[in-house]
Amino acid sequence: MIDRNAAIARYLRLEPVPSLPDIKLYTAHSGSRLSQFAGDEDDPPAPYWAYQWAGGLALAHHFRAHLGLVAGQRLLDLGAGSGLVAIVAARLGAEASAAEIDPNGRAAIALNATANGVALPLIDIDLRGAPPQNIDLIAAGDVFYNAEIARLMLPFLVRCAEAGIAVLIGDPDRRDLPHQSLTRLASYAVGDVGDQRSSTDRTGSVYALK
C-alpha cells in the first residue's frame, strides 16, 4: 500500500499558488506519476486534491476581500480537495475544518495545512444526512462537477441553510451548477490550473443560495 504522505511530498511540488503567493500547496506537475495514487480501484476518483481549482480560488479571494465573513467563524471547507479554502480561512482567523472523501486528498490537506502553519481537522460528511453540528459557514468550492454529485449536493446545502448555516459556493459556471437556485455575489479572475491547465485566465464566481 502506498504511503500517501511520503508519495505526495516526493512527487508533487510544494509551490506558491500563482494568485495567492503567500499560500503554498503540493501541486502536480508532469513528473508527478499521479497514476500511483489510484491504487487498485477500478474507478478511482480524479486527483482533484493535486491542483487548485477556479471555484476554490474564487472563495479564497472573496474571503480576503471581505475579512468579516470568516474571522471568528467555524468554517467547513466542503469537498476540500487540497484544502486551499480552509487554509486561507484559517489564516484569516476562522476556526476552519475540512471534509474530503478521497484518502489522497485527506493526506494532501494535512500536508498543505502543515506547510502553511495552520491546523485543519478533518470531519466526515454524509450528503444524504443531516447538516453538520457546530458549523457557522460552509464554503463549497467546485462541488458541482457532475450531475450525480449535483443532485445530492444542492439538497444537502439547502438543508444546511435551513439549519442556520451560511453557505457560499465557488464555481466557474460549470454545466451542472444549479444557477436557478443561486445568487451570484462576486466574480474573480483566477488562474485555474486544474481542468483547464492550458489557460491561465478564467473567472470563478461566488454564490449564495436564494
Image: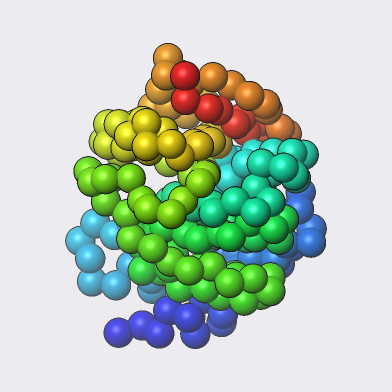
In this view, the residue in front, 55 or 30, is: 55
Does residue 210 appear to the left or right of 192 in the view shown? left
Let me know if residue 175 appears in the view: no
Q: Is residue 210 above or below residue 43?
A: above
The single residue placed furthest to the top in the displayed view is 180
Q: Is residue 197 above or below residue 210?
A: below
Q: Give the residue at x 38% y 73%.
A: 36
Foreground pick, 42 / 186: 186
Dividing the picture into quadrants, the one containing residue 17 is bottom right
What's the residue at 69%, 58% (across, down)?
Answer: 93
Give the colour scheme of this rendering: rainbow
Q: Residue at x 69, y 38 (%)?
A: 62
- Is residue 202 visible in the rendered image? The answer is yes
* 62 sits to left or right of 167: right
Quadrant of residue 113 in the image?
bottom right
User: How far across and how far down the image is residue 52, in percent?
Assistant: 59, 52
Q: Position of residue 80 (x, y in %)?
A: 48, 54
Which corner quadrant holds the N terminus? Answer: bottom left
Is 8 placed above or below 199 here? below
Q: From what the image shows, is residue 11 above or below residue 179? A: below
- Total marks placed: 0
Please state the horizontal and vertical placement of residue 170, each as a whole percent of the image: 55, 36
* Residue nearest the viewer, comparing 134 with 142: 134
Q: Residue, x 38% and y 27% (percent of image)?
A: 176
Residue 50, how many percent across, how many down?
52, 61
| Image quarter of residue 156 | top left
